[in-house]
Amino acid sequence: DDAGEEPKLTDGFHLVIDALKLNDIDTIFALPGIPITDLTRMAQAEGMRVISFRHEQHAGNAAAAAGFLTQKPGICLTVSAPGFLNGLTALANATTNCFPMILISGSSEREIVDLQQGDYEEMDQLAIAKPLCKAAFRVLHAEDIGVGIARAIRSALSGRPGGVYLDLPAKLFAQTLDAAAGKKSLIKVVDPAPRQIPAADAVKRALELLKGAKKPLILLGKGAAYAQADADIRALVEKTGIPYLPMSMAKGLLPDTHAQSAAAARSYVLQEADVVLLVGARLNWLLSHGKGKTWGQEKGAKQFIQIDIAPTEIDSNVAIAAPVIGDIGSCVAALLAGIDGKWAKPPAEWTGAIAERKDKNLSKMAATLAARPSPMSFQSALSVIRDQVKARPDAIVVNEGANTLDFARSIVDMYEPRKRLDVGTWGIMGIGMGFAVAAAVVTGKPVIAIEGDSAFGFSGMEVETICRYNLPICVVVFNNNGVYRGTDVNPSGSADVAPTVFVKNARYDKLMEAFGGVGVHATTADELEKALNEAVASGRPTLINAVIDETAGTESGRITSLNPSTAKKK
Ligand code: FYN
Ligand code: ADP
């Protein structure tokens, strides 16, 4: 035997880690367990950041938010069956939001699963994931790991971003391969999100329509925030002089205090505009499907220009007169190229009418914010947060709830792009702590999570995660003793409280203290202000239990009308 050395081997574990690292993915949001516990250990040993959660849904939400913030697919790693299912909610939500993420789940042995012989955590995960995400793959052989990861990355990032499922059966991790062959099998994905240049005639059609508008409006969505074309988007707004409206996660693309923001005249501009340029925003329920009273249908038809990377989005709800298909960076640049010094700004009649509405709403708002009622109102508490964000525009705001969401959206001004993460397209509760952890981990900036007390409950246990990694997150729980408010009464006479009511006067701050963070019980705006200042300045994990008037809050906030009410006569 003349072999001097044993051949160097690698294994499935290391090929997964090496493939991710080769593609500049340095963080995994995970929950260890069979069969991926060693994968988390080894990933950490190999220099990756492994953030380990208490429930997979929050690891998944963290991966989704990381994807939105960085344009790299966020990675969520879970165990099989139940862990996979917990992560799947986040994967489906990411896909709905057009955020790139990859859910990697360990799974049971194919031979047993496919014969349904009852394996440990048996489940045909690939089949279940498929209809809920953008793409789904399974890797059976270690030499295919490189291809599997490459396909997952490309699927998540190219075209309309979304969630991808990658199924890795337990046996795969232990498989060995010659190290050199293993290395050669990995793929560094070149140009994972290729630019898509819009057609010249589509750009021309859009510019002509925009030029002829008497009451033009630009509507910016979270696709525009994701695209990281901030300077060109701002230039498009400013060079055309067209008023713009940001969807909630597009707030801050231009500062909310910008003279051209029509946010405080939202109803008016939606009703009155004649030509609307949509940039990375879908005409879904959040925009009343582009029709009806919200859009002033009785005042005559609107014409839409829509920039989107997904051609099938066009005409999904109403006719789109000028679709511009491509990536937002390329599309906005192409429009800008057609806007010269001779571009006529919109008529003063239009901008003047908006300014008038806006001023009225702004001064109404200023009056409510100045009040200092006891107990605190949503507005008085939010005015404190508004001032803090003004002082620290680099801070990231996470926001969920019903009233807490709706009030915060209009009260807390944002000044920089991608600083606001919220319930998104589904209006989902439970994103709070997952999004907050991701925001802190990938940006290192202070995070302020503005949470309804109900919304917080969905991910509350992750305060332990926040403390464990010592993240600069300040959670403010708007505690009004229940879902929507705390005053509902059980009409039946039985001992149970009403379904929307929680334990009264709960102390969420103690939850943070239990894990070594700072807990503050704030009953006045001054107490809230002091605690928030300290939290942001120190970067210590903090939870402020902000006591809000339990009678405050309407059913479902500003979307009350979505609650069905019976047509049956009482
Ligand atoms: C906005 N407004 C302001 C300001 N900003 N007034 C003064 N100052 C400022 N800075 C005004 C604005 O003109 C509107 O008044 C009103 O405040 C509300 O504005 P908002 O919040 O932008 O608009 P609206 O109508 O609530 O928006 C519709 C929506 C939004 C569907 C896009 O509600 C939304 O994103 N909802 C998500 C809800 C959700 O997911 N909930 C979670 C589930 S809760 P007018 O112009 O007078 O109308 C389960 O129960
Ligand atoms: P909002 O909820 O803020 O209105 P949506 O999530 O409805 O925003 O819309 C985002 C849209 O942006 C989606 O239709 C998506 O296809 C599109 N989009 C996402 N990223 C890009 C991109 N880089 N270029 C073009 N369109 C994009």
Image: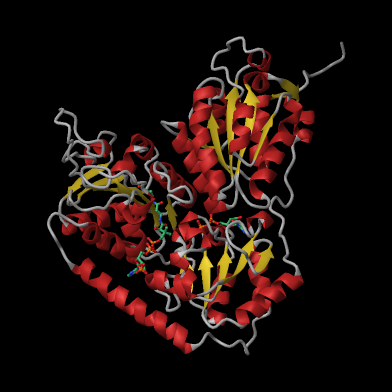
Which residue ends up furthest to the front in the rendered image?
569
Q: Residue at x 70, y 50 (%)?
A: 192
Q: Nearer the viewer, residue 345 or 535?
A: 345
Q: Return the residue found at the far left.
A: 374
- Image point 14% across, 31% down: which residue? 493
Picture colour scheme? secondary structure
Work out which residue is located at the far right of the displayed protein and give it.
Answer: 2
| Picture residue at 41% right of the left edge, 61% below the top | 394
Asked if one can make out residue 252 in the rendered structure from this viewpoint, the answer is: no
Tell me which image quadrant ligand 1 sits in. Answer: bottom left
Q: In the visual, does 346 lie left or right of 401?
A: right
**Rendered view: 1 above or below 183:** above
For image coordinates 72% across by 66% down, the residue present is 198
Instruction: Give the image location of residue 490, x and y in percent.
Output: 18, 35
In percent of width and height, residue 297 lies at 49, 69
Left or right? Give the position of 497 relative to 222: left
96 shown above or below 177: below
* Residue 413 x/y as whole percent: 37, 66
Quarter placement of the C terminus: top left
Q: Is residue 145 left or right of 80 when viewed as pictured? A: right
Say which of 448 and 445 sits in front.
448
Q: Is residue 305 visible?
A: yes
For this rendering, which residue is in front, 67 or 301?
Answer: 301
Examine the image and state in which quarter residue 509 appears. Answer: top left
Query: Could you tell me how many numbered marks the image carries?
Result: 0
**Residue 314 versus residue 148: which sits nearer the camera?**
314
569 over 183 or under it: above or below: below
Residue 214: image x %, image y %? 54, 83
